[in-house]
């Protein structure tokens, strides 16, 4: 989990934002809907044509 999603004042941490670790497998030519952008982490939460969702590295897609 990225540290920016945690508040860590001591040895324990409190989650500040929900975080799902699922990655979405892709093939060249897939068209995805971008649902969420994590610019600092370099990931996009995407939905495929079959309604599957997951994180995709932003450097592997042509995204504006």
Image (tube, rainbow, N blue to C red):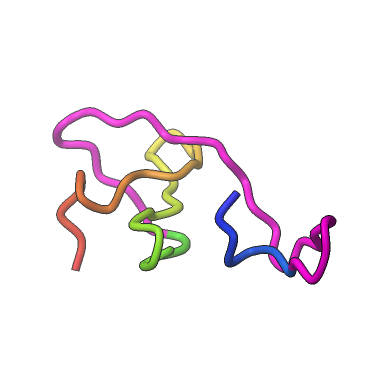
Left or right: residue 46 versus residue 30 is right
Q: Position of residue 48 (x, y in %)?
A: 39, 40
Closer to us: 46 or 3:
3
- The quarter of the displayed image where residue 30 is located: top left
Magenta span main SS: loop
- Is 17 included in the stretch rendered in magenta? yes
Q: Reply above or below: 33 against 29.
A: below
User: Residue shown at 39%/67% (left/top)?
Assistant: 40
Residue 2 horizontal side relative to residue 33, left or right: right
Residue occupying the point 46% across, 63% down: 36
Q: Position of residue 4 (x, y in %)?
A: 58, 67
Q: Please name the residue shown 46% across and 60% down the image.
A: 35
Query: Horizontal and vertical percent for residue 54?
Result: 49, 41
Does residue 38 appear to the left or right of 15 in the view shown? Answer: left
Indicate the quadrant containing the C terminus: top left, top right, bottom left or bottom right. bottom left
> Which residue does the image show at 43% across and 63% down from the upper left?
38
- Left of 32 or right of it: where is 22? right
**Picture mark count:** 0
Residue 42 lies, with reference to residue 8, above or below; the image says above
- What range is drawn magenta here? 8-34
Where is residue 29 drawn, in percent x and y? 15, 36
Q: Magenta includes 29? A: yes
């Amino acid at each position: 989990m990225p540290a920016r999603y945690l508040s860590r004042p001591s040895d324990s941490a409190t989650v500040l934002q929900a975080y799902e670790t699922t990655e979405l497998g892709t093939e060249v030519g897939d068209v995805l809907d971008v649902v969420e952008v994590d610019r600092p982490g370099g990931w996009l939460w995407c939905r495929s044509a079959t309604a599957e969702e997951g994180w995709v590295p932003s450097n592997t897609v042509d995204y504006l």
